[in-house]
Amino acid sequence: MLFSSISFLYYFLPLTIGLYFAVPRGFKNTVLLLASLVFYGWGEPKYVILMALSVLLGYGFGLLVEKYRQKSAGRILCVASVGVSLSFLLYFKYADFFIENFNAVTGMGILPLRLALPIGISFYTFQIISYTVDVYRGEAAQRKLISLAVYIAMFPQLIAGPIVRYHDIAKQLERRGHSLSGAACGIRRFVIGLAKKILIANQLGELCGVFRTSGEKSVLFYWMYAVSFALHIYFDFSGYSDMAIGLGRMFGFSFPENFNYPYISASITEFWRRWHISLGSWFRDYVYIPMGGNRKGVGRQLINILVVWMLTGFWHGAAWNFLLWGLLFAALLTLEKLWLLKKLEKSRFFSHIYTLFFVVISFVIFNAENLEQAFSDIAGLFGAGGIPLACAEAVYYLKSFGLLLLAGGIGATPALRVLVSKISENPAGSRALNLIEPAVLALLFVVMTAYLADGSFNPFLYFRF
Amino acid sequence: MSAKKKDFVLCLVFGLLLAGGFLLCLFLPKAKYSESERRMLSPRPKFSAQGVWSGRFMSDFESYAVDTFPFRDFLRGIKAVTALHVFLRQDNNGIYAEEGFLASMEYPMNEASLSHAARRFGYIREKYLTGENRIYLSVIPDKNCFLAEKSGHLSMNYRDFEKKMADLADFAEYISISDLLERDDYYKTDTHWRQEKITDVAERLALAMGTEVSEDYELCEMEQDFYGVYYGQAALPFAPERLKFLTEEAIRGCQVYDWQNQKQIPVYNTSVFDESGSDGKKAAVRDPYELFLSGSLSLITIKNPNARTDKRLVMFRDSFGSSIAPLLISGYAQIDLVDIRYIHPDHLGQFIDFEGCDVLFLYSSLVLNHSDTLK
């Protein structure tokens, strides 16, 4: 089920919120779990079983790891738990990639499995791993199956994150407060996330779709596509994260932030501190640091960076372009770490241009169907193949999407937040903001419902991962 | 307002929106047909274990929830206005408004589609026609051709389109009519041309095919409001129009036979707005442009008993042909109208005598550019 759907907003959500607040405290997790199973089963009825099995295994391993963590068996159990979780991920997400490449190298004809990717498997697998590793590191194992199941399968963050670490919400699973201000904060965050998704990301997604099907390419059109996709993926994914965090707040949880205006970064290093923060910190804490991080010399550190970014790329998809995407970031981060970062500090303007340029290029690679298309798209950005600088179609769509691109560009910076914060410093401004905020959010909600009722373009990008 | 009050109001408003929406979704009576979009709405799916397990129940429910959402037409209007006037999008779902007209951006030219159409026409020629048949081709430009240049929307180069089509179907003599048409010759909210504005087109076609047609007509007007197909797609506020049609002695004396339903039909189906018209369909389900020869029928024969000629015409056509055919009948003893979107050409030999007749392929650029429906 999509957050940005009529069925979620006007059937599932009112029912879930109603039930959640109607039942006594002791049953709230049960309501959340049941709602989450319906939410997941709505899109993937068959894979509910897989998710339930993953939860049960995580639960069992957690208890065993806790029991034996002082002994060598604890380590073996922890590794086994990670192995089992990863084996599900490998089987469902990567099997065909390995089969196809094995066939290509050996000339054999092993038939691909053609399995449908269980939605959110990359996210909940990482949460289960986080749980068992945290237990191995000393966190108390969860004794209540329902509580652990809620942690893994809670619908706000089940499908596209943020990747919530067990120790971050372990206490909230047992005892959490519900307040009017918390609920209002959650509503605000949810509506803003929904607006990012429906009003900006979806429309920019349309432009990307138009570019892809167009037979009339030009340099201008390639750049419009590249910039649109960079904004599209940001508003799509950060919008989803906002909705997840907002829903979490409504139910009394505090999920970690996942984005912090990444497009204002002045280096790739900074970009990755602001983009998909929960994934970056997951890889840092569960891969990079256990591999030695920066504690074993520069050579080892560079190898660790390479491994982490290859895995980050591969996590996003079982295709070579995702690996290339990860490797590009590995190369840029290595360069920055070795000497570029100091140079970038000298010119804020240049460093922004450099960062945005490589981020845009990286997303062209990311969104390609395959490596061939990735290289062809990048070549198109620089006019390869004798394509014209502009074409009628590009000019038309620039006119049609110009304001949206501008709004997206501004919306990707903290400008609006700074403006609101400045206004609210003044008591009169603060009162005025308090007055108009509910009206603006309600109006936004109605307009977004209108977009949904029109049945326009709507998929979430990060459901692919 | 204090921050605490604001939080309370926000929770209250959001709660009311969700709860109100939920209750309306559950209890408001559901329409089965969308008049503005001219399509059946998705029905409520039946709950079954198999449907749930396969996921079909859920996907059907998603369609049902969107299609039957309360005040959907109103909300679609809000979306259209937001897209066009807030985000300054140049079109909404590919439809745009310009100078009081709605048009669809027909772009780009689909050469493969033109080739397919020409191949289908060539097949008919190979199967049924000989050197004795005079074969003509004419293309009707879509409204976008007359609006896009001024408004800056995308449109095909219509001259290239005509030339390409004429070259591909070079066995037919091409009759150009584009210079006779302009924006005002089309209904404002519909794809189609206005019959009362195309008498010059009928005259040119007739002249080129070696016959003469009437020049004097009586103008009739339907009393009901007519909203064209773009009206529903655009979801923009537009005033209705009135359908008009022309009649004269030859038209009044015609006999029209609908081979598909094996019955006589009128030239002008004035019951098109009636709750249950002569074709038995409910008014809401019918395209009012079916006024002309009852719309999308696969094969119709119009006989003109008062004709001063024995010339016969077989017209391969789309819905634009329905409104021009009555204007040509005074120049022919019989016109057979064939819509090869609904009948395979292999079956035509049973119904049509092609010997010595004129053959006209008259198609709108809209159909030729998406000709995969031509059999």
Image (cartoon, coloured by chain):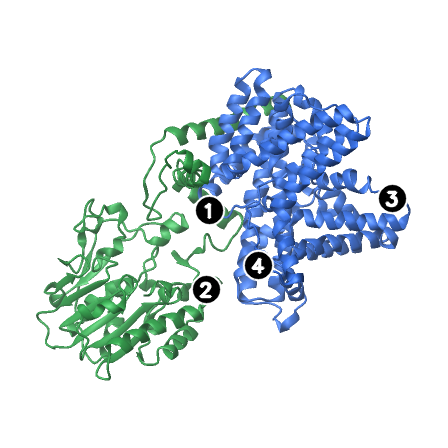
Chain colours: A blue, B green
Q: Mark 4 sits on what residue?
A: A398
Q: Nearer the viewer, mark 1 or mark 2?
A: 2
**Looking at the image, is A165 positioned above or below residue A319?**
above
Q: Nearer the viewer, residue B57 or A364?
A: B57
Vertical side of A433 occupied by B303: above or below = below
**Which of the two discs, 2 and 3, sits closer to the camera?**
3
Task: Please state which of residues B39 and A314 is positioned toward the viewer in this rendering.
Answer: A314
Query: Label 2 lies in what chain?
Result: B
Residue indicated by mark 2:
B107
As helix, strand or loop, the secondary structure at mark 4 comes to helix
The crowd level at tag 1 (other Cα within 10 Å; few <14, some 14-19, many 20+) is some
Callouts 3 and 4 close, C-beta under 8 Å? no
Q: Nearer the viewer, mark 3 or mark 4?
A: 3
Q: Residues within 10 Å of mark 2 (few under 14, many from 20)?
A: some
**Camera-side mark, 1 or 3:** 3
Toward the bottom, the furthest residue is B131
Q: Nearer the viewer, mark 2 or mark 4?
A: 2
Instruction: Tell me whether circle 4 and circle 1 mark residues in contact (CB < 8 Å).
Output: no
